[in-house]
Image (cartoon, helix red, strand yellow):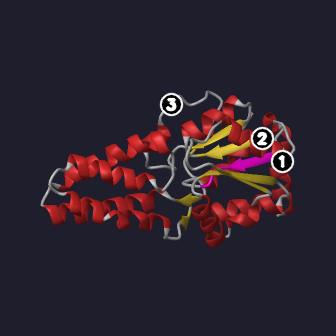
């Protein structure tokens, strides 16, 4: 086992990597499934109460949520704006649309599931003496609950929580890099969001690994994948991938 840990360090040294930086949502935990669960519940209830076709309610909710994400980021207050706009489109059914907002807010109350193998990978990296940081984009209180309930907070020397009202960018990854006392090209960054994780990370000169099956949200897969990015199907492939990077 000591040789196993040694090989991890040797692979990172060969690559010139001193720090691994991770995204949180849909990289280490399943966040998207909570959105799907409660958006579906909201659609089912509104469709049943109003008699509207489920497909109509579903299309309206998803389209307006995508629009407001671009304007408001990941602030939970976004849902209030979304349902207000849904009510404006589903004329005559405003009461049902608005009163069921509480269903969507359940997203922020549920403890997320850890991605399969995420804790094992982090534990191995920790045992191998690898420095790690986390850069996550969400409401601060919600993020702290997720980290504490899953135990993930214990693995990172630095945790950067990006302002929920904006989108994750190069400056946010650079903040974590600076706090870890290294240069961008001494970092390997892993995330599921092409626009918020992989592209900005590559732009600052870091090595990148894209968990391309991480998010179910198409917005997170929009953009051109940097040529040097290594693709992962699951986070459990991270350790073996280190030996194949050049």
Q: Earlier in the sequence, mark 1 or mark 2?
A: 1
* 66 relative position to 122: left or right: left
**Circle on res. 134:** none
- In terms of depth relative to the viewer, which is nearer, 70 or 16? 70
Write down the quadrant of residue 45 in the picture: bottom left
Q: Earlier in the sequence, mark 2 or mark 3?
A: 2
- Name the spot of residue 5 as percent of width and height, x first: 83, 57
Residue at image mark 1: 180
Q: Which residues are magenta?
A: 19-24
Q: CA distance from mark 3 to mark 1?
A: 28 Å
Q: Residue at x 86, y 62 (%)?
A: 2
Query: Is residue 237 something one can see in this rendering?
Result: yes
Q: Residues within 10 Å of mark 1 (few under 14, many from 20)?
A: some
Q: Residue at x 82, y 38 (%)?
A: 186
* 179 relative position to 135: left or right: right
The mark lying in front, picked from 1 and 2, is 1
- Name the spot of residue 154 as percent of width and height, x first: 75, 66
Residue at image mark 3: 223
Q: Is residue 20 magenta?
A: yes
- Name the spot of residue 39 as percent of width and height, x first: 35, 59
Q: Is residue 226 magenta?
A: no
Q: Residue at x 87, y 44 (%)?
A: 181
Q: Secondary structure at mark 3?
A: loop
Q: Determine contact: label 1, label 2, CB under 8 Å.
A: yes
Q: CA distance from mark 2 to mark 3?
A: 22 Å
Q: Quadrant of the N terminus?
A: bottom right
The mark lying in front, picked from 3 and 1, is 1
* 70 relative position to 120: left or right: left
Say if 105 sits above or below 239 in the image: below
Q: Earlier in the sequence, mark 3 or mark 1?
A: 1
**Circle on res. 187:** 2
């Amino acid at each position: 086992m000591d040789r196993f840990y040694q090989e991890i360090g040797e692979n990172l040294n060969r690559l010139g990597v001193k720090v691994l930086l991770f995204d949180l949502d849909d990289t280490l935990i399943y966040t998207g499934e909570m959105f799907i669960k409660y958006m579906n519940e909201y659609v089912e209830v509104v469709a049943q109460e109003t008699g509207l076709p489920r497909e109509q309610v579903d299309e309206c909710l998803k389209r307006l949520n995508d629009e407001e994400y671009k304007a408001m980021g990941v602030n939970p207050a976004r849902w209030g704006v979304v349902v207000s706009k849904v009510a404006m489109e589903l004329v005559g059914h405003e009461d049902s649309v608005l009163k069921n907002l509480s269903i969507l807010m359940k997203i922020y109350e549920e403890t997320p599931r850890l991605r399969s193998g995420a804790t094992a990978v982090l534990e191995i990296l920790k045992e191998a003496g690898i420095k790690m940081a986390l850069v996550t984009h969400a409401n601060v209180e919600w993020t702290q609950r997720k980290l504490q309930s899953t135990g993930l907070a214990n693995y990172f020397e630095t945790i950067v929580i990006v302002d929920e009202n904006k989108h994750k960018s190069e400056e946010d990854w650079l903040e974590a890099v600076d706090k870890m006392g290294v240069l961008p090209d001494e970092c390997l960054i892993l995330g599921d969001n092409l626009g918020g994780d992989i592209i900005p990370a590559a732009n600052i000169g870091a090595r990148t690994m894209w968990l391309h099956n991480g998010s179910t949200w198409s917005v997170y897969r929009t953009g051109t994948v940097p040529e040097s990015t290594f693709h992962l199907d699951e986070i459990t492939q991270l350790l073996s991938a280190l030996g194949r990077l050049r």
